[in-house]
Image (tube, rainbow, N blue to C red):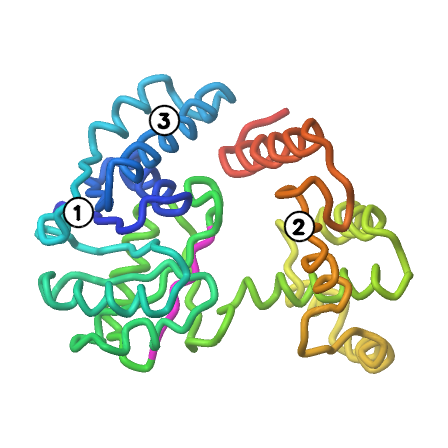
Amino acid sequence: MQKNITVFGPGLMGSGISQLFASKGFKVTICARDSIEESYALESIKSNIKILIENGAEQPDLLEKTLGNITITRDRKQAVRDAYIVFECIPENMELKQDLFYELDCISSEETILATNTSVMSVTEIGARAKHKSRIIGTHFWNPPFLIPLVEVVKTAHVSDAVVQNTVDLLVQAGKHPVICKKDVPGFVANRLQHALWREAIAIIEQGIADPETVDEAIKYSFGIRLPVLGPIENADMIGLDLTLSIHDYIFKYLDSSTEPSMLLKDKVKKGELGFKTGKGFREWTAEEMQSSRKRLLEYLIKATKGLSN
């Protein structure tokens, strides 16, 4: 059975998800609001694929094959007409998402899966106005979605087991690594873990324990190296839960446990020190350093996910 994919919101994530499925041979329909979104989607996909080809990760004919599987329309009814699944990637605005899911629930087949790519918002709340809640699910892709393997499949109290399994099966077919988040909680799984680390990292800087560069180096040159093959739970079992308990019993009282964002972070945002956006955040960045950082990350991800050697 041909599984047609529809994407609403062809921005950074929507374009990447469209590219992912189209490159795997799926027929993809992108629903754009205007010519600006249409142009962005196509140029983004072309740029991404050219980078993959230039780095030896894909064959030269991938661009033509991928674009051949993509259709762009501004007609919402047409976009969902034959959709097996719809991926929503519009801005993180609850009202906009609720409006869209209500409309999608009305105009699409009851068999169509409706998936939101929200990174933090409640999937249940997003689908609150829809009648057929059993087909609404969260599918949180990570940026860039055509490289990062993980997709968090977020269950609600309403979603059917069949929709969950069909979504997981589709993602596996597309070459992704889906994991199931059993509860619809803010941040799901990976963002909760990521920002717990960020909270402590910022607290260490704020408390004068180490400078920003040292914090990053301490992570990248220690446990960060083993994280791709050894997660924290496997690591705890490896060293022994008795030792893990002893360490936690001693150190937890010294770790940051604030439920509010860091005052240092708030102050920097207030002063307009926004990082790459302004050239200064926790560190100062030249244009060349920012370009180098982005290039280094992309090349690393290509090598790590495409099995390429140095």
For marks 1 and 2, the one nearer the N-term is 1
Say which of marks 3 and 2 sits in front.
Answer: 2
Instruction: State which quadrant residue 261 falls in.
Output: bottom right
Q: CA distance from mark 1 to mark 2?
A: 40 Å
Residue 55's place in the image compared with 305, above or below, is: above
Q: Residues within 10 Å of mark 2 (few under 14, many from 20)?
A: some
Q: Secondary structure at mark 2?
A: loop
Instruction: State which quadrant residue 103 falls in.
Output: bottom left
Residue 225's place in the image compared with 106, above or below, is: above
Inspect the magenta stretch and tell me whether residue 102 lies in it: no
Residue 148's place in the image compared with 187, above or below, is: above
Residue type pointed to by label 3:
Lys
Residue type pointed to by label 2:
Leu
Q: Which residue is mark 2?
A: 274
For marks 3 and 1, the one nearer the N-term is 1
Residue type pointed to by label 1:
Asn
Q: Residues within 10 Å of mark 1 (few under 14, many from 20)?
A: some
Q: Which residue is mark 1?
A: 4
Q: CA distance from mark 3 to mark 2?
A: 29 Å
At 67% from the left and 78% from the top, the residue drawn is 259
Q: Secondary structure at mark 1?
A: loop
Q: Which residue is mark 3?
A: 46
Say which of marks 1 and 2 sits in front.
Answer: 2
At 56% from the left and 34% from the top, the residue drawn is 298
Number of the label disc, if any, that sits on residue 306: none
Characterize the magenta stretch by its predominant secondary structure: strand
Q: Which residues are magenta?
A: 150-156
The count of marks equals: 3
In depth, the one of 26 and 212 nearer the eye is 212
